Image (tube, helix red, strand yellow):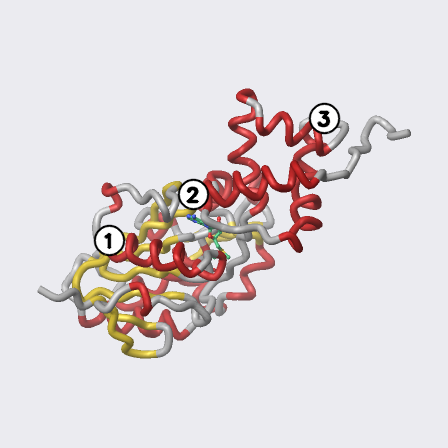
Amino acid sequence: MLSALEVDETLSSEDFRWLSSFFENRTGIALKGDKEALVRGRLLSRARALGHSSLTTYVGFARSGAGVDEQTAIVEALTTHETSFFREPAHFEVLRQFASQQPKPLRVWSAACSTGEEAASIAMTLAEVDPSLSFEVVGTDIAPETVRRARDGLFPMERSVQLSPERLRRHCLRGTREAEGTFRLQPALAARVRFEVANLFELPASLGRFDVVFLRNVLIYFNDGRRRQVVKAVLEHLKPRGLLLPGHAEQVRDASADLKSIAVAVFRYEPSP
Ligand SMILES: C[S@@+](CC[C@H](N)C(=O)[O-])C[C@H]1O[C@@H](n2cnc3c(N)ncnc32)[C@H](O)[C@@H]1O
């Protein structure tokens, strides 16, 4: 017998099949069979929050016409949003050098930005090159709730240890009252960073072209064909001689002969005329 708050945790193989195929169609990410426990764990809290007594009824609801919004919540729950400030720090030194030599204004894209720490690190780096530097940082991600958090721009105080005291003093403000326990970018800096929901497989032309693209720690989730598809699509938004920065474990060169490796995980886009 289940008590009122308990949810029957059985995830049938038919439901797992539907979830995997829906998730792969939407995000390009394949959920292997060994991800079943992870899927069950992440969806149980959704099922509980919506008052379902079993995962079976929850998945049935998500599959139905009435559950279309829930499909977005499933994408949110099953994608991995791990990120940090100045992750893979060598890239920020590359950005600093590039920005000092480039004509301005600069446009930098944090593709798959998660909760915004990468975009904030880019903005801090550019402001450090020259406080009056003209630039725009755009962050995009497929997960709408994650993008909403990036837009809110309130970072949990525990994350402040990822920033030097000098950077915290110079670029950040401590949250007060309802934002107690968080910190944020200084408003003038935050105003130069904006966030949009965008799927790397359906990028809107309105994104325009960028001087530098951070495409980090997302390609690892795709199979080779999709990974190359995403790199090609992203290159449509990179200016000639602009930089593509994938994660250090991610391959991009096999997607285009126009990418010249100039350092570890740093590629210059040199399209043939
Ligand atoms: C591990 S985080 C990487 C965050 C950041 N780039 C970094 O390196 O710290 C991966 C992000 O990719 C996003 N993502 C996964 N599939 C995507 C897709 N098809 N289009 C856009 N974003 C996607 C996820 O929502 C998640 O926030």
Q: Which residue is identified by label 3? A: 51
- Residue type at numbered disc 3: Gly
- Asked if labels 2 and 3 touch by Cβ distance under 8 angstroms, the answer is no
The percent position of residue 18, horizontal first and vertical second, equals 59, 37
Is the residue 42 above or below the residue 86 in the image? above
Q: Is mark 3 within 8 Å of ligand 1?
A: no
Q: Earlier in the sequence, mark 3 or mark 1?
A: 3
State the image quarter where residue 52 is shown.
top right
Residue drawn at 52 percent across, 28 percent down: 69
Give whichever of 158, 200 is nearer the camera.
200
On the rendered image, what quadrant is the N terminus found in? top right
Q: Earlier in the sequence, mark 1 or mark 2?
A: 2
Is the residue 139 above or below the residue 267 in the image? above
Q: Which residue is identified by label 2? A: 151
Q: Nearer the viewer, mark 3 or mark 2?
A: 3
Residue drawn at 39 percent across, 44 percent down: 199
- Asked if labels 1 and 3 touch by Cβ distance under 8 angstroms, the answer is no
Q: Is any atom of residue 87 visible in this view?
A: yes
Specify the label residue 203 is tagged with: none
Could you tell me how far apart the alpha carbons at marks 3 and 1 are, in whole angstroms?
A: 43 Å
The percent position of residue 23, horizontal first and vertical second, equals 52, 42
Q: Which residue is identified by label 1? A: 237
- Residue type at numbered disc 2: Arg
Mark 3 lies on a secondary structure that is: loop
The percent position of residue 134, horizontal first and vertical second, equals 21, 57
Mark 1 lies on a secondary structure that is: loop
Give whichever of 95, 264 is nearer the camera.
264
